[in-house]
Image (cartoon, helix red, strand yellow):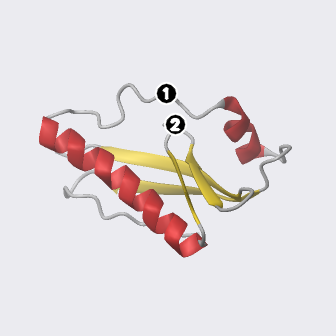
Amino acid sequence: MAKAHIIRAVVFRGRNAWVAQCLDHDIATQADTLDTLLYELERIVVAHLIVADTDGLSDPFAGIPKAPHRFWEASRAPHPGINVLSVHTFRLGGPGGAPPVGVGL
């Protein structure tokens, strides 16, 4: 049975782009628009799942540390330099197999 993965990410506006920083795994991406950002976030997380599946790994995020502490702090309360638009949680995989990825704000 496929394991479910819960991914939490903070979304904020950086200096020149929108940024999504996953909290439980130090995975981040950026883009010019929110729509493109969410697409890129989905793409990078699914890529980890595909590589793990191809390599026969049970945990696609093994060895990836948690995000730096400042992002965790920003997810809970205002933080200098990180004006969080949203904290988004989505579920990948689990019973039923392949990951229907639902990313949105």
Q: Is residue 93 visible?
A: no
At 17% from the left edge and 43% from the top edge, which residue is drawn?
53
Amino acid type at image mark 2: Asp
Badge 2 element: loop
Q: Which mark is residue 65?
A: 1
At 51% from the left edge and 71% from the top edge, which residue is drawn?
36
- Label 1 near label 2: C-beta < 8 Å? yes
Q: Which residue is mark 2?
A: 26
Left or right relative to 83: residue 6: left
Badge 1 element: loop
Whether 44 is drawn above or below 63: the answer is: below
Whether 81 is drawn above or below 59: the answer is: below
x and y, in percent, of residue 35 in the image? 53, 74
Q: Is residue 45 visible?
A: yes
10 Å neighbourhood of mark 1: few (<14), some, or many (≥20)? Answer: few
Amino acid type at image mark 1: Pro
Mark 2 or mark 1: whose residue is earlier in sequence: 2
x and y, in percent, of residue 17 in the image? 66, 62
Q: Which mark is residue 28?
A: none
Nearest the eye: 51 or 100: 51
Whether 42 is drawn above or below 7: the answer is: below
At 30% from the left edge and 64% from the top edge, which residue is drawn?
100
10 Å neighbourhood of mark 2: few (<14), some, or many (≥20)? Answer: some
| Total number of numbered discs in the rendering | 2
Q: Work out how far the residue at label 2 is from the one at label 1, CA to CA, in angstroms.
A: 6 Å
x and y, in percent, of residue 88 in the image? 58, 58
Whether 70 is drawn above or below 82: the answer is: above
Left or right relative to 63: residue 81: right
**Quarter the N terminus occupies:** top left
Left or right relative to 92: residue 71: right
